[in-house]
Amino acid sequence: MRKCLLALLLLPGWSGLAQDPQPVPPGTEAICGFTSNYRYWDADKVRQGLSVDMFVGGAQPGQPVNLRFYVNRKPGDVPVDGLQVEHERLIHVIGVRDDLSGFFHIHPLRNGPGSWLVTHTFTNGGNYKIWSDVKYQEVSYGFAQPLLTVSGKINPSNETRDIKERVITSGYEIKLTHSNPLLVGKTNRLEFVIHDASGSQVLTENFLGAPMHLVLIKDDLSVYLHAHPEHREVVDSPDPIRFFELFPRPGTYKLFAQFRPKKCNLPLDDALLAEFYVKVETPAAPAQSAGK
């Protein structure tokens, strides 16, 4: 059974201030769906080595705003180019409001040495957490940006955090099954099956080099996991889209599953989004033998 070890992204302050981020130990399997070492860092704490810094002007709901990213090496803020393609893009930018609404997954374009730009329109005010994923010299990096405040009216999310095994999006039913219970420190299986309104199973087509992308974010934003399926290639198979996940902390997580149904005629870079909540538990302590 393949294990997809995802980056274990811990609370802010977990990383030291003056040393390189620590890599996840390499293995023969993909890490987090990436085929190289994976390192995570809080962008504002990097003092040495590669960094991706974000710059944003005044952001307001309903107004396009430029998100600028500067790939550089510290100390000295020296611009770095030569990023490598990872899942068909050079930079992946993923964001969500601090109440886990307003998810987005976008891709900046290079506009100068080390400089990347993408325009995004936030639908609501509030505080947003944004991550930038890049690959450089065969190492994949995830950088957590400081919270971005979008000024303006904060429309609260009306979703409930009920644990559901089925959701409907754009007329498609997405069913999630998983290891029960989901446990910290264990390899957990998550499987997705998609049906249309008639009940027929729907296969997916390629979306950024995989049949589905999955982002998992803990409700306090302390853990960010970007996953890809066990089989990265798209195949005409009725088998579920399967992930193997390692959770670093117990609690409530929100899952954001992006996919493109076959023959859906979506714009080239668009995907549908299915959202789930799951609970992750701490394994029970092993029972002690009698007499001890």
Image (cartoon, grey):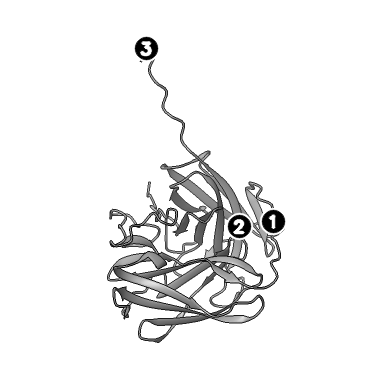
The amino acid sitting under disc 1 is Glu
Quadrant of res 119? bottom right
Quadrant of res 21? bottom left
Residue 242 image point, x, y percent: 48, 52
- At mark 3, the secondary structure is loop
**Other-residue count near label 3 (Cα within 10 Å), few / some / many at <14 / 14–19 / ≥20:** few
Residue 12 image point, x, y percent: 44, 57
Ranked by sequence position, the earlier of labels 2 and 3 is 2
- At mark 2, the secondary structure is strand
The amino acid sitting under disc 3 is Gly
Q: Are marks 1 and 3 in contact (CB under 8 Å)?
A: no
Write the residue at 61% across / 72% down. 150
Whole-Å distance between the Cαs marked 2 and 1? 10 Å
Residue 207 at least partly seen: no
Q: Is residue 39 above or below residue 108?
A: above
Residue 159 bears which disc, if any? 1
- At mark 1, the secondary structure is loop
Ranked by sequence position, the earlier of labels 2 and 1 is 1
Whole-Å distance between the Cαs marked 1 and 3? 51 Å
Residue 151 at least partly seen: yes
Q: Is residue 25 above or below residue 71?
A: above
Residue tagged 2: 275
Q: Is residue 285 left or right of residue 153?
A: left
Q: Is residue 49 left or right of residue 86?
A: left
Ranked by sequence position, the earlier of labels 1 and 3 is 1
Q: Name the image quarter holding the C terminus.
A: top left
Q: Are marks 2 and 1 in contact (CB under 8 Å)?
A: yes
Residue tagged 3: 291
Write the residue at 50% across / 80% down. 118
**Other-residue count near label 2 (Cα within 10 Å), few / some / many at <14 / 14–19 / ≥20:** many
The amino acid sitting under disc 2 is Glu
